[in-house]
Image (cartoon, rainbow, N blue to C red):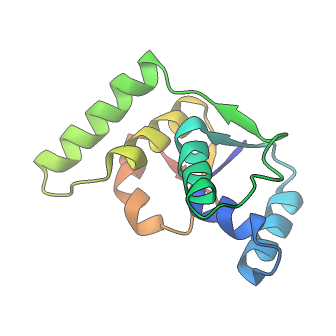
Amino acid sequence: MIILDSDVMIEILDKESELGQRSAEEILESNDSVATTAVNLHEVLYGLNKHGKRAEGLRSLRVLGFNRDEAILSSRIESELEREGMPVQRADAMIAAVTILNRAKLHTYNSKHFTPMKRFGLVLFK
């Protein structure tokens, strides 16, 4: 399964984005199922609402929740990396935890944000 990060979702929704078109093609070629997290959906919907845009194309996308196990793992990721001088954004730790616990791959354009979380089991797409 491939989890779409917010930045990837935004590019794919932008029908004029070459980057988004390439990502959509790569995802199709992978034959993997596709989902996102509730955290990513919130981020994308917030941006669309803020700019008065409609959320077309998101209704059929599978959305994975954030529950107890994800909270435990994401808090561990965030606190350990912060202790080591590599603070991460809370939302990124939450997204990583959902991805890890669902044994999925995260498709993001912000690999710099997520690379430190690979040691916790995060796998990046491509």
The residue lying at 37 percent from left, 47 percent from top is 119
Observer-nearest of 59 and 62: 59
Q: 1 left or right of 5? A: right
Q: 46 left or right of 92? A: right
The residue lying at 48 percent from left, 20 percent from top is 67
Q: State whether residue 108 appears in this view.
A: yes
Q: Position of residue 62 (x, y in %)?
A: 76, 36
Q: 2 left or right of 75? A: right
Quadrant in which residue 86 is drawn: bottom left
The residue lying at 81 percent from left, 42 percent from top is 33
Q: Position of residue 104 (x, y in %)?
A: 63, 41
Q: In the image, is residue 100 above or below residue 116?
A: above
Q: Please give the count of numbered marks on the rendered protein.
A: 0
* Most distant residue in the front direction: 52
Quadrant into which the C terminus falls: bottom right
Observer-nearest of 101 and 75: 75
The residue lying at 62 percent from left, 48 percent from top is 105
Q: In the image, is residue 85 above or below residue 105?
A: below
Q: Position of residue 90 (x, y in %)?
A: 33, 45
Q: In the image, is residue 86 above or below residue 109?
A: above
* Most distant residue in the top direction: 68
Quadrant in which residue 107 is drawn: bottom right
Observer-nearest of 84 and 56: 56
Observer-nearest of 96 and 123: 96
Q: Position of residue 48 (x, y in %)?
A: 63, 58
Q: State whether residue 5 appears in this view.
A: no
Q: 31 left or right of 45? A: right
Quadrant into which the N terminus falls: top right
Quadrant in which residue 53 is drawn: bottom right
